[in-house]
Amino acid sequence: MHALLAALALAAGPAPSATAAAAPVELAAGETPTTSPPPITGPSGEVVLPPQVPYQLRIAFLPLISYGSNVGLQLGGALVFYKAPKGGGPRRDWLALGGSYATHGPRSIEVKGEQFDIAKTPTRAFYQAKYAVDDSAPYWGEGARLAPGDKPGAGAPPDAYRYRGVGPWLSLVVREPLPGAPGAASPWSLFARVRFRRQEVLDPGAALASARPAGFEGGTLTMLHAGVLRDTRDEEISPARGAFLDASIFAAPPLLGTNTMAGGNVGYRVYHRLRPGVVLAARAMYELKLGDVPFYERTQIEGLNYGEGIGGPGTLRGVARARLAGEEKILANVELRATLVTFRPADRPLELGVSTGLDAGSVRQRGYSRLSALGGFGGLRAIWDRALVVRFEAGYANQGEVAWYLAFDESF
């Protein structure tokens, strides 16, 4: 943690200046692109970009040292290039080059970033290219049912329920804000996404070798998304007010991969400040996939909340990674986040506090009965310079056991 704080402090140093329009950006680790309020429209409906402000190009090295019962110890780092306004304020265009190694999970290298005001328009894009090797990729059986007497726990899958997954992941998200009323900004945006995945399935465990589900021999997938979002949050890193809604439909066409499927996803997050420093946050998500869905895609959550499925510090604490897998997914979370004290080392705010809440998830694979899990958690939290969230939490769920997590962003 101290190394992360030092790196961010170094990132605040001067660098060559640049000029760009102001808008927020999230630099925390993770695969979710950031959001920002759309531009203001003029009396005739034309788009009016915010006033130009002086920006500095900054460089930071962010070491990664984290732990999760589901992936073990994770080590890595990222070299981040980003623009920040002189005198402080929301960051914007950024590029990160990084890699990580987990003792019981994926090892990867990746390039990702975000570009604002493309071709001097309000259009923005988030891009990512990643190559991962996961010797403990989970497969929990058809219908996510284990053999009699087996327990999933909250850590890496037992040998019978794992395989070696290898392959690249490419993703591009383009966002276009919708015009608002004259002189006002609209919270609505349209987005499109294309995701490409090549998955090699090696060294299957006993459960996978016996079931031989769709995708057992690996394959390629190109998923196309179209969606809409509405963002009224006061900020992106750790909101205290507002809501975020995103809904999308998606399809993997037959000529662009080895599997054909389609579906839809809708997610809603809301934040309410109960008093200064105390925030009640909630999230709900529903997703349905139809068609020839390979087993490794049953874990994936689509839309703007894309990433691995239900289980772990970002979805359901106390449950093993991707424990709940199926074509239909339901996720719900409620969190109470409280800041107890604020310090100002290096003249930047360091907020320390606590959090607690409930996580719930439910999935169903076609032809099998529904599988659900309910868990609770509590922990300590810190927010550095309103730019980096650090969480240390313990959780327990009925489909898992007691689990521990050290994570570097909000769960949602």
Image: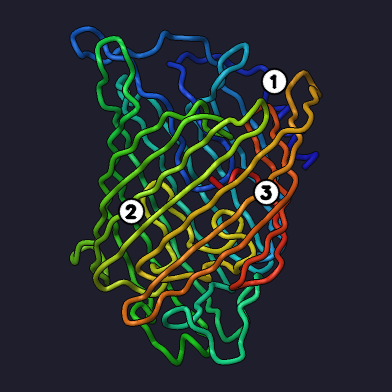
Q: Nearer the viewer, mark 1 or mark 2?
A: 2
**In the drawing, does residue 109 fall left or right of residue 2?**
left
Residue at horizontal 55 percent and vertical 64 percent from the top: 311
Residue at horizontal 63 percent and vertical 72 percent from the top: 400
Residue at horizontal 26 percent and vertical 9 percent from the top: 42
10 Å neighbourhood of mark 2: few (<14), some, or many (≥20)?
many
Q: Secondary structure at mark 3?
A: strand
Q: Which mark is residue 66?
A: none
The percent position of residue 294, horizontal first and vertical second, equals 35, 73
Quadrant showing the N terminus: top right
Distance between the alpha carbons at the discs numbered 1 and 2: 41 Å
Residue nearest the observer in this picture, 263 or 200: 263
10 Å neighbourhood of mark 3: few (<14), some, or many (≥20)?
some
Residue at horizontal 53 percent and vertical 85 percent from the top: 146
Q: Is the residue 254 above or below the residue 45 in the image?
A: below
Residue bearing mark 1: 13
Q: Is the residue 411 above or below the residue 374 in the image?
A: above
Report the amino acid beneath label 3: Thr
Which numbered disc flags the more N-terminal residue, 3 or 2? 2
Q: Secondary structure at mark 2?
A: strand
10 Å neighbourhood of mark 1: few (<14), some, or many (≥20)?
few
Residue bearing mark 2: 265
Q: Nearer the viewer, mark 3 or mark 2?
A: 3
Report the amino acid beneath label 2: Asn
The percent position of residue 312, horizontal first and vertical second, equals 59, 61
Residue nearest the observer in this picture, 396 or 83: 396
Residue bearing mark 3: 356
Report the amino acid beneath label 1: Gly
Which numbered disc flags the more N-terminal residue, 1 or 2? 1
Distance between the alpha carbons at the discs numbered 3 and 1: 35 Å
The percent position of residue 48, horizontal first and vertical second, equals 30, 12
